[in-house]
Amino acid sequence: MTERRPKIAIVVFPGSNDDRDAALAFEALGAEPALVWHGELELPRDVAAVALPGGFSYGDYLRCGAIARFAPVMAAITRFAADGGLVLGICNGFQILCEAGLLPGTLRPNASLTFACRDVPLVVERADTPFTSRCVAGQRLTIAIKHGEGCYFADEPLLSELEANGQIALRYEQNPNGSVAAVAGVLNAEGNVFGLMPHPEHAVDALLGSTDGALVLGSLVDAARDRALALV
């Protein structure tokens, strides 16, 4: 019997430029990607997960993600997450989720005040999440970054809370942007929403130098498949 391909919605904002890359990556990993325009009021039927891709939504005016948080589709995504739906934000998608209050903390300009674009080593802090289940705790991943405002910030009380709750799933081995506590990826308290600044969709094909991103996206595909089957 052919294994079911879970449907993963990929939101397209004006300025998104990694939506097709994410779609290709998810398709290669066994999912059915569905591009969803930011003006939609509802998500497609049978969606098992949602991904907000990288890019420069609304030209990054005001600050990254500040306008995208008001896109009509975000209300549907907020409801989806509140019902336990799986939501992934990559780079600009991470920024949007923070602006929308679906993830804690915020993203600020890189400490260097320059754009960073290179492969970086990451350390998996947690492997018991829907986004890292194909990984092993302590595992080293190599995934590319490309951002100018990727410096994650949380004040001391919030950071202590995140550490205590195990909401930091990925850290930089060599901090490329000044993120507090070298945070590269953060979960919400319920564990069904995850944002990271590195681009796993650019680390799925060996031709690009690393396939470590497939561990992250493949974990989501696995979890989305399980959720789709549970909702049948």
Image (cartoon, rainbow, N blue to C red):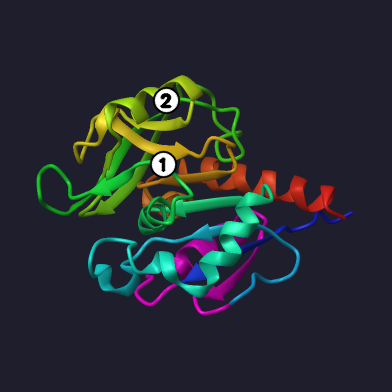
Q: Residue at x 33, y 26 (%)?
A: 157
Q: From the viewer's perspective, is 44 left or right of 210?
A: right
Work out whether residue 49 can be spotted.
Answer: yes
Q: Residue at x 42, y 64 (%)?
A: 69
Residue position for label 2? 161
For numbered disc 2, what is the local secondary structure? helix
x, y percent for residue 152: 29, 41
Question: Magenta includes 16?
Answer: yes
Identify the magenta region. Answer: 13-40
Question: Magenta includes 227?
Answer: no
* Amino acid type assigned to the residue bearing label 1 in the image: Pro
Question: Looking at the image, do the residues carrying marks 1 and 2 touch, with CB atoms under 8 Å apart?
Answer: yes
Give residue 151's quadrant in the image.
top left
Split into 4 quadrants, where in the image is the C terminus? Answer: bottom right
Residue position for label 1? 104
Q: Residue at x 62, y 39 (%)?
A: 130
* Amino acid type assigned to the residue bearing label 2 in the image: Glu
207 and 215: which one is in front? 215
Q: Residue at x 58, y 61 (%)?
A: 77
Whether 127 is drawn above or below 164: the answer is: below
